[in-house]
């Protein structure tokens, strides 16, 4: 009986300790939220600038785009390797552009923010409008933190895509007509992800959904995957792996 009494006291002491810890963590969380809410906005004068990159001697490119927060637009139509317009009103958010054409072979293009963004206020702006060359074979890697992204890759000579999105809506247009297999990986976060897919090129989509909903238009189930009518009939196939978060995933054949 004495041992049972001691064990009961230990359980009560442990319970009180855990409640105390939970209270401290709760207060700490509130403090962080209040501190963020009271933080002074860094918004200043709006800076706009343009950047262009020549292809050089490379015959293919790996493009790395890393944006912490804001609005990202990617498309084709660049005369050189890349043409971009940037707009931001926090000085530390100026993007850094670098390119190594490797003299020959595959060049490496990077556009990224040297400073982290933990959040944006309504009066803060950070916008990238990036255009890539349609004819250069491009392996595209995009990391988008929080914000809105729109990628129209239908006219690019796309050889691969790796897209990781944090919070916010994202639209990815993969409705190209490529004559070689293309592998695309999309990792969604919190927000709606819309993926447009081609009709003439075979498509296979594997979706590992989290808490979100998957809607597929113009696709049929093929085992654990979704396929279009051209799957298995066309010479090349677009293979898409999607890992969903808590947002909705929309697949649409166009």
Image (cartoon, grey):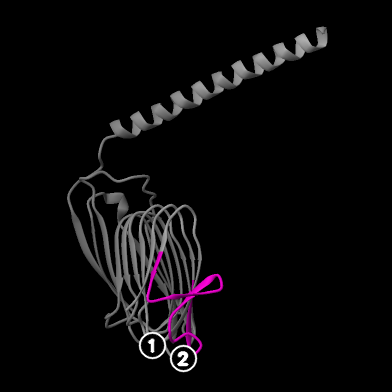
119 vs 18, nearest the viewer: 18
To which quarter of the image does residue 107 belong?
bottom left
User: How many numbered marks does the figure carry?
Assistant: 2
SS of the residue at dot 1? loop
Image position, residue 187 (x, y; %): 46, 61
In this view, the residue in front, 32 or 232, is 232
Magenta region includes residue 238: yes
Residue stretch in magenta: 215-240
Instruction: Give whichever of discs 2 and 1 has the lower sequence position.
Output: 1
Q: Quadrant of residue 95?
A: bottom left
Q: Are marks 2 and 1 in contact (CB under 8 Å)?
A: yes
- Could you tell me if residue 53 is visible in this image? no
Which residue is farthest top?
2
Please identify the quadrant where the N terminus is shown: top right
Is residue 112 at all visible to an observer of this figure? Answer: yes
What residue sits right under mark 2 in the picture?
A: 234
**Could you tell me which residue is drawn at 38 percent across and 51 percent down?**
115
Q: Is residue 101 left or right of residue 72?
A: right
Distance between mark 2 and mark 1 Cα atoms: 7 Å
Residue at 31% in and 53% down: 93
Residue drawn 35% across and 79% down? 175
The residue tagged 1 is 200
Residue 49 in the image: x percent, y percent? 22, 64
SS at mark 2 in the image = loop
Could you say which quadrant of the image residue 189 lies in? bottom left
């Amino acid at each position: 009986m004495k041992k049972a009494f001691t064990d009961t006291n230990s359980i009560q002491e442990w319970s009180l300790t855990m409640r105390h810890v939970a209270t401290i963590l709760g207060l700490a969380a509130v403090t962080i939220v209040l501190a963020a809410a009271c933080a002074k906005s860094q918004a200043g004068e709006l800076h706009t600038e343009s950047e262009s990159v020549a292809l050089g001697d490379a015959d293919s490119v790996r493009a790395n785009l890393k944006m912490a927060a804001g609005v990202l637009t990617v498309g084709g139509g660049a005369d050189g390797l890349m043409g971009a317009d940037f707009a931001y009103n926090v000085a530390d958010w100026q993007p850094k552009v670098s390119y190594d054409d490797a003299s020959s072979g595959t060049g490496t293009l990077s556009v990224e923010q040297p400073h982290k963004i933990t959040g944006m206020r309504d009066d803060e702006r950070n916008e990238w409008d990036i255009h890539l060359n349609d004819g250069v074979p491009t392996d595209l890697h995009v990391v988008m933190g929080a914000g809105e992204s729109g990628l129209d890759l239908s006219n690019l000579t796309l050889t691969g895509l790796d897209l990781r999105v944090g919070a916010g809506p994202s639209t990815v247009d993969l409705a190209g007509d490529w004559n070689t297999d293309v592998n695309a990986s999309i990792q969604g976060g919190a927000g709606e992800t819309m993926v447009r897919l081609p009709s003439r090129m075979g498509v296979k989509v594997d979706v590992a959904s989290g808490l979100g909903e998957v809607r597929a238009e113009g696709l049929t189930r093929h085992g654990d995957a979704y396929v279009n009518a051209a799957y298995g009939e066309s010479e090349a196939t677009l293979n898409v792996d999607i890992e969903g978060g808590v947002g909705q995933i929309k697949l649409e054949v166009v």
